Image: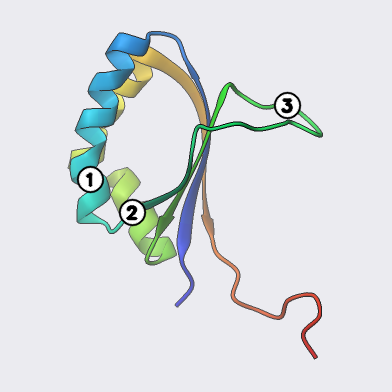
């Protein structure tokens, strides 16, 4: 089973209120086995557009990633995020096939 991912670009408009979202999302993320791979940090946008903050979250499966987003726990947290930021979020299935250099 391939993993699932949330890829998000976020512009935080109210840093104090956004802290409530960060505290609230922990319940849903723990329940669905989320693991942060990217959580802010230094970056360089080399093509296209980027928001101020990039986040990549790994889940055990694509279904777990979808279920987390649709869960009551995350819906509660989402209310805080929507009041404190603008975001683009994509939920995507991981790839587990051949890689460059594989024979």
Residue to which mark 1 is pinned: 28
Q: Is residue 58 left or right of residue 74?
A: right
Label 3, residues with CA under 10 Å away: few <14, some 14-19, many ≥20 = few
Q: Residue sitting at 71 percent across and 80 percent down?
A: 98
Q: Position of residue 95 (x, y in %)?
A: 60, 69
Instruction: Return the disc, 2 or 1, that comes first in the chain's sequence.
Output: 1
In this view of the protein, which residue sits in the foreground, 24 or 73?
24
SS state under label 3: loop
Labels 2 and 1 touching (C-beta < 8 A): yes
Above or below 50: residue 7: below
Mark whose residue sits in front, 2 or 1: 2
State the SS at label 2: loop
From the image, tell me which residue sits under label 2: 34
Q: Is residue 85 left or right of residue 19?
A: right
Marks 3/2: CA–CA distance: 26 Å
Instruction: Name above or below for residue 96 compared with residue 32.
Output: below
Measured in 3D between alpha carbons, the distance from the residue under mark 1 to the one under mark 3, in whole angstroms, is: 29 Å
Give the mark, 3 or 2, whose residue is nearer the N terminus.
2
| Label 1 SS | helix
Residue at x 22%, y 51% (from the top left corner):
30
- N-term mark: 1 or 3: 1
The quarter of the displayed image where residue 81 is located: top left
Q: Which residue is mark 3?
A: 49
Badge 2 local density, few (<14 within 10 Å), some, or many (20+)?
many
Please identify the quadrant where the N terminus is shown: bottom left
């Amino acid at each position: 089973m391939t993993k699932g991912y949330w890829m998000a670009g976020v512009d935080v408009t109210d840093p104090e209120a956004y802290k409530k979202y960060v505290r609230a999302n922990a319940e849903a993320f723990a329940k669905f086995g989320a693991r942060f791979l990217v959580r802010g940090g230094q970056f360089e946008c080399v093509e296209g557009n980027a928001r101020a903050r990039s986040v990549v979250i790994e889940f055990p499966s694509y279904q777990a990633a979808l279920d987390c987003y649709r869960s009551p726990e995350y819906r509660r947290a989402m209310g805080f995020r929507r009041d404190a930021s603008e975001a683009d979020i994509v939920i995507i299935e991981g790839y587990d096939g051949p890689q460059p250099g594989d024979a």
